[in-house]
Amino acid sequence: MGEVIRFVSKSERERARLIQEARAIYDSIFPPTDPASEGQDKAAMGRAYIGRDGGNLS
């Protein structure tokens, strides 16, 4: 019941899609060699998606 719905603009969705596509291309050219480093990459990528409001949903 207390869900917060956040508006995501078309440009923000496109930016996220392009970043994801670029990451896939990069990983296909330079595959990660250490499975432990993949977790660090995902954490860094998560920070890249935090919006101008610092990630606040309200």
Image: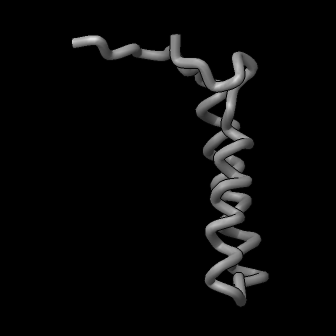
Estimate the x, y position of residue 51 in percent, counting from the top left.
69, 25
Look at 65% across and 73% down and name the residue there: 38
Residue 49 coordinates in the image, percent (x, y): 67, 38
Name the residue at 76% across, 81% down. Answer: 29
Toward the viewer: 44 or 21?
Answer: 44
Q: How is the image coloured?
A: one colour
Give the image location of residue 34, x and y in percent.
69, 87
Answer above or below: position of 31 versus 37.
below
- Identity of the residue drawn at 68% across and 32% down: 50
Q: Is residue 30 above or below residue 49?
A: below
Figure quadrant of the N terminus: top left
Q: Quadrant of residue 40?
A: bottom right
Q: Quadrant of residue 17?
A: top right
How many numbered callouts? 0
4 lies left or right of 51: left
Q: Is residue 49 above or below residue 23?
A: above
